[in-house]
Amino acid sequence: MTALLTMEHLAGTSIERACEDACRVANLLSVGVQFSFNSVKCCAYPQGSSAHLAHRWQEELSRKDVGPIGRYAVTNPEAAHKWFREREA
């Protein structure tokens, strides 16, 4: 199965909780999960770390320069690359 779900979080949800929820759903359903949190687009993939995703979010939020695609935080790149390779197969 290949899919990318969009998740919305309730106001007041912490970034740690949002990342934990997204990673849990990604692992449970074997899908990618994306959500926006304070203008940073976050993507969780199966086998990704919620702690790593929260750390990347913090780094993106504190960046002064915003590139042409905006601010993005993704679970550990190895997990994302593996997931994308499996999608292509």
Image (tube, grey):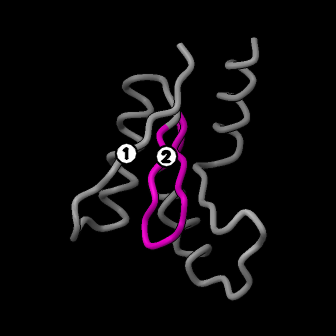
In reply to whether residue 46 is colored magenta, the answer given is yes
Q: Nearer the viewer, residue 50 or 15?
A: 15
Please, is residue 25 above or below residue 30 in the view? below
Of all residues shown, which one is farthest toward the front? 68
Please, is residue 11 above or below residue 80 in the view? below
Which residue in the protein does label 1 denote?
7
Which residue type carries mark 1?
Answer: Met
The local crowd at label 1, few if under 14, some if 14 to 19, many if 20 or more residues have their Cα within 10 Å, is some
Q: Is residue 63 left or right of residue 16?
A: right
Q: In this view, does 56 lie to the left or right of 11?
A: right
User: Is label 2 in a helix, a strand or a loop?
Assistant: strand
Q: Where is residue 1 in the image (x, y as percent from the top left)?
A: 53, 13
Q: Position of residue 12 (x, y in %)?
A: 21, 70
Please, is residue 13 above or below residue 48 in the view? below
Of all residues shown, which one is farthest toward the bottom? 64
Q: Which span of residues is magenta-colored?
A: 33-49
Which numbered marker is on residue 28? Answer: none
Q: Nearer the viewer, residue 1 or 17?
A: 1
Which residue type carries mark 2?
Answer: Gln
Residue at 75% x, 18% y: name it.
88
First in sequence: mark 2 vs mark 1: 1
Residue at 33% x, 51% y: name it.
8
Which residue in the protein does label 2 denote?
34
Please, is residue 56 above or below residue 63 in the view? above
Residue at 75% x, 11% y: name it.
89
Q: Position of residue 78 (x, y in %)?
A: 71, 40
Residue at 58% x, 49% y: name it.
75
Q: How far apart are marks 2 and 1 (CA)?
A: 6 Å
The reply to whether callout 2 and callout 1 are in contact (CB within 8 Å) is yes
In reply to whether residue 88 is colored magenta, the answer given is no
Q: In which quarter of the image is residue 25?
A: top left
